[in-house]
Image: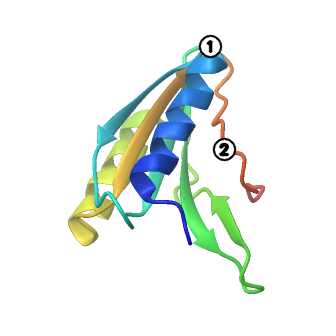
Amino acid sequence: MLLHTELWVGALIRRAELGGAFAVVARKGDTRAGAVLVKAVNRGDGTSRLYAEATRMDGEQVWMQPAKSDQEAELDRYIERAVRVDPDVWVVEIEDRQGRHFLTEPVEAT
């Protein structure tokens, strides 16, 4: 049985807070099976990264960067488009001085 999205998001926020970051649900989606976008904001250098769930060709679940920009405004526009396509999507924003995402699952290098 897969973990409900709402529980997974709560765990991510808790990991971020325990690590000294600030994390919020910027947009709540479907509680059971909504996709998740994670925006990691680095307040130290003013950059941001966006992460989205993906499935590799071998079937492994990973996180990747769907938008290569590091500018928060551009990432916000990507998020707006994603929400129009999938109204069940969750958006989690994490503000951290080091820009950490706190994802424990594999993250594909960019």
Q: Is residue 21 above or below residue 87?
A: above
Report crowding for label 2: few under 14, some 14 to 19, many 20 or more residues within 10 A (C-alpha).
Answer: some
| Residue at image coords 63%, 19% | 18
- Badge 1: few (under 14), some or many (20 or more) residues near its Cα, within 10 Å? few
Residue located at (73% from left, 86% from top): 57
Amino acid under disc 1? Gly
Instruction: Tell me residue 63's x, y (percent).
Output: 64, 59
| Image quarter of residue 36 | bottom left
Label annotation for residue 20: 1
Task: Pinpoint residue 48: horizontal percent, then vertical percent.
Answer: 54, 34
| Residue 6, position as x, y percentages in the image | 39, 50
The N terminus: image quadrant: bottom right
Left or right of residue 83, residue 41 in this image? right
Q: Which residue is mark 2?
A: 103
Q: Is 5 left, or right, of 69 in this rendering?
A: left
Q: How is the image coloured?
A: rainbow
